[in-house]
Image (spheres, rainbow, N blue to C red):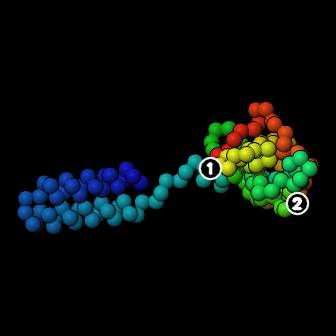
Amino acid sequence: MKVLIVLLFATILLTFSNASNLDEINANASETDEVIELIATQKPPVRFIDKVRAIGRKQAVGVKGKLMCGGRPVRNATVKLWDNDMFDPDDLIAETHVNEDGTFEVSGFAISITAIDPQLRIYHNCRSSSKVCRRKITFTVPDNYVNKGMQVNKWFDLGVPNMEIGVKHKEEPHCY
């Protein structure tokens, strides 16, 4: 679309810069109107990802659990379910926040030609004194908890992890 706009602008400049009288400007303006109409009626190109979604299959996944920080429920944590993609940006499947008691359920579906690779990413402040950064821990959801369709058939139960734990190579700060 940007290329078309640049071409349109160049056409208009050339049209009026080469005109020597009013009749030429009116004639050239008519040609410019035709170019504008041609550009305006062009359909946007179909993106590759749109083609993939058209032939991909729906795959659902769900995770539940309870997050603790020592002996207390984690509060104000965000839980996100992602499809971890190798060659393009990861796709957010669903997002939720923990309840007052630290429990959560997050589920959704993604459309993909290949099997989705779901990850659970938890953003929390347990064992962190930072006001601008949250700890981010990533869990890989086993493949056998992914099913065809849009509804979850088999939930992955994360259990009750103590978020005080440090997870080497799977934890990183997430700052605002």
Asked if residue 37 shows in the view, the reply is yes
Q: Which amino acid type is marked by label 1? A: Tyr
| Label 2 residue SS | loop
Residue at left offset 36%, top offset 53%? 4
Residue at left offset 60%, top offset 53%? 50
- Left or right: 20 in relation to 50: left
Give whichever of discs 1 and 2 has the lower sequence position: 2
Residue most toward the top?
168
**Do callouts 1 and 2 mark residues in contact (Cβ within 8 Å)?**
no
**Which percent across, then down, holds residue 58?**
76, 55
Residue 22, compared with residue 127, is above or below; it is below
**Which percent across, then down, holds residue 102?**
86, 57
Residue picked out by circle 2: 101
- Left or right: 69 in relation to 46: right
Q: Which amino acid type is marked by label 2? A: Asp
Front residue of 134/89: it is 134
Residue at left offset 41%, top offset 54%? 1
Front residue of 135/147: it is 135
Residue at left offset 28%, top offset 63%? 34
| Label 1 residue SS | loop
Res. 176 mark: 1
